[in-house]
């Protein structure tokens, strides 16, 4: 796991009581997927292997640090991970509304968070990569025209994924996410994207 951002929560951030620093955790690339997919959770036949792996690994880390483990799944109610990512100063809405991260690009994925009782010193916010992105290719990358700066057409997206042409997105990940120049440098493997696409398109 890698630190995807952190911030000092205020009263409106819906952090647990006593949390002085909230730390977001995401996949450490390259190489995350081969390590995780070899874990016991992926071989026992039970559902939601990635979520169960996240609970085990982040839960153990929380116990070691005296923190509270938080996850973006398991609701309702759900924790406000998108708001927390934006509060960290390392993630922002992209031109097509999907979250974009300074390192992971539009492949950003929080596996969990740690609510720490200590107030840690934090680095300054990162610059938003979209502000210096030439051409902003995410705006025109969706082959179905379902995800643009005008919004997201969920039905058109799923209909495209059901078609032969949509199998490229199913196998390699959303074309819009892949088009982001920051995403291209992140090192996420197609097999991980295929796992998430299969979960999304059910």
Image (tube, rainbow, N blue to C red):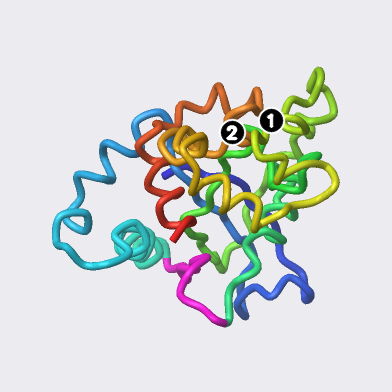
In the image, what residue occupies the spot 37% across and 62% down?
51
Residue 193 location (% of width, % of height): 44, 40
Q: Which sits earlier in the primary sequence, circle 1 or circle 2?
A: 1
- The quadrant of the picture occupied by the C terminus is bottom left
Quadrant for residue 143, please give it. top right
Q: Quick one: label 1, few (<14), some, or many (20+) residues within 10 Å?
A: some
Q: Quick one: label 2, few (<14), some, or many (20+) residues within 10 Å?
A: some
Q: Nearer the viewer, residue 151 or 51?
A: 151
Quadrant for residue 130, please give it. top right
Residue 21 location (% of width, % of height): 62, 61
Q: Secondary structure at mark 1?
A: loop
Q: Secondary structure at mark 2?
A: helix
Q: CA distance from mark 1 to mark 2?
A: 6 Å
Residue 32 location (% of width, % of height): 35, 37
Q: Are marks 1 and 2 in contact (CB under 8 Å)?
A: yes
In the image, the segment drawn in magenta is 66-76
Look at mark 1 in the image and give the residue it sits on: 141
In the image, what residue occupies the spot 41% across and 45% down?
1
Q: Nearer the viewer, residue 171 or 8?
A: 171
Tell me which secondary structure the magenta stretch mostly adopts.
loop
Q: Is residue 89 left or right of residue 114?
A: right
Q: Nearer the viewer, residue 1 or 74?
A: 74
Question: Is the residue 196 above or below the residue 66 in the image?
Answer: above
Q: Nearer the viewer, residue 90 or 99?
A: 99
Q: Is residue 158 left or right of residue 32?
A: right
User: Which mark is on residue 20?
Assistant: none
Look at mark 2 in the image and give the residue it sits on: 175
């Amino acid at each position: 796991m890698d630190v995807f951002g952190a911030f000092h929560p205020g009263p409106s951030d819906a952090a647990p009581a006593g949390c002085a620093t909230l730390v977001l955790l995401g996949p450490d690339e390259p190489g995350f997927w081969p390590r995780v997919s070899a874990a016991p959770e992926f071989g026992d036949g039970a559902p939601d292997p990635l979520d169960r792996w996240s609970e085990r690994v982040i839960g153990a880390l929380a116990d070691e640090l005296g923190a509270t483990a938080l996850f973006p799944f398991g609701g309702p109610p759900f924790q406000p991970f998108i708001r927390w990512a934006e509060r960290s100063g390392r993630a922002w809405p992209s031109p097509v509304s999907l979250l974009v991260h300074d390192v992971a690009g539009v492949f950003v994925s929080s596996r969990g968070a740690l609510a720490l009782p200590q107030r840690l010193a934090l680095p300054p916010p990162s610059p938003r990569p979209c502000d210096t992105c030439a051409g902003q290719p995410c705006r025109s990358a969706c082959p179905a025209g379902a995800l643009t700066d005008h919004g997201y057409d969920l039905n058109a997206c799923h209909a495209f994924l059901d078609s032969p042409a949509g199998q490229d997105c199913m196998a390699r990940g959303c074309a819009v996410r892949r088009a982001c120049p920051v995403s291209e440098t992140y090192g996420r493997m197609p097999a991980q994207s295929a796992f998430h696409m299969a979960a999304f398109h059910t």
